Image: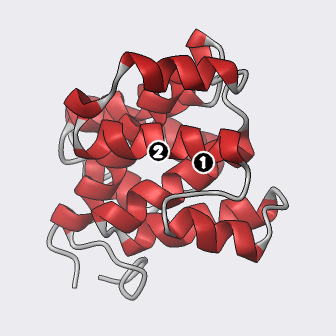
Amino acid sequence: MPRLTRLTPDTAVGASRDLLGELVSRHGQVGDMVATMAHSPAVLGGYLQLSRAMKRAKLNRKISERLSIAVQVQQGCGLCLEAHIAAARGLGVDDDEIARAREGTSADPAIAAAIDLGLRVYREPTSITDQQIAALREHGYSDREIADVVGIVALNLLTGAFNLVAGLTPDNAGKE
């Protein structure tokens, strides 16, 4: 059962009412996470800004979805994990690579290196070494793509942690 209630443009107040109203008018509806985030205009606004910014990431989307899968396995947000697996499949990532991403790796050494960096950012950023960054560059990653890994992890941390605190799970999404 969700721990926090969904809000609508009619039940939200202040900046959240404006943000939700704008989203509903553009998209027709909003998901449970966004409707629940509206309790905090700061969180909702920050999420929307970071989410929009990461859509402009240089990091290949197939890689970012595998990275998101690896992070969500660690974080434990089933709702996010399901969404990222579906997104990866929609991009053509096969089931073997999805299984590897769930294990925090890839058959492709360059993708495995990016996932490893992301998991280190998530678990223990102080463990990241100059050699690891140099290895990413040897795999062809630019500084921008390396920075994008941090952004993808930050977005996943926000969404996964929020869903876990709010009690949003695959079993109760859309129910209240």
User: Residue furthest toward the top?
Assistant: 143
Q: Indicate how the structure is coloured in the image.
A: secondary structure
Task: Where is residue 74? Give x, y as percent.
Answer: 33, 63
Indicate whether 153 appears above or below 3: above
Element marked by disc 1: helix
Is 118 in front, or is 2? 118
- Residue 139: give x, y in percent of width and height: 70, 27
Question: Would you say residue 59 is visible in this rendering?
Answer: yes
Q: Residue at x 52, y 46 (%)?
A: 115
Q: In front here: 109 or 34?
A: 109
91 to the left or right of 2: right
Q: Residue furthest right?
A: 92
Residue 36 sits in quarter: bottom left
- Give amino acid for label 1: Ala
In which quadrant of the rendered image does the C terminus lie? bottom left
The Cα–Cα distance between marks 2 and 1, rounded to whole angstroms, is 6 Å
Identified by mark 2, the residue type is Asp
Please give the residue where the numbered disc 1 appears in the rendered image: 112
Where does the image place residue 93, in percent across and percent down from the top left? Answer: 78, 62
Discs 2, 1 touching: Cβ within 8 Å: yes
Depicted 66 relative to depicted 166: above or below: above
144 sits left or right of 171 in the view: right
Task: Work out which quarter of the rendered image holds the N terminus and state it.
Answer: bottom left
x 74%, y 76%: residue: 95
Dot 2 falls on a residue whose secondary structure is helix
- Taking 11 as reference, is 15 above or below it? above
Q: Residues within 10 Å of mark 1 (few under 14, many from 20)?
A: many
Relative side of 176 to 103, left or right: left
Q: Residue at x 73, y 50 (%)?
A: 108
Return the x and y of residue 58 as percentages of the image width and height. Answer: 68, 22
Decide which of 9, 94 is in the foreground and name it.
94
Q: Which residue matches tag 2?
A: 116
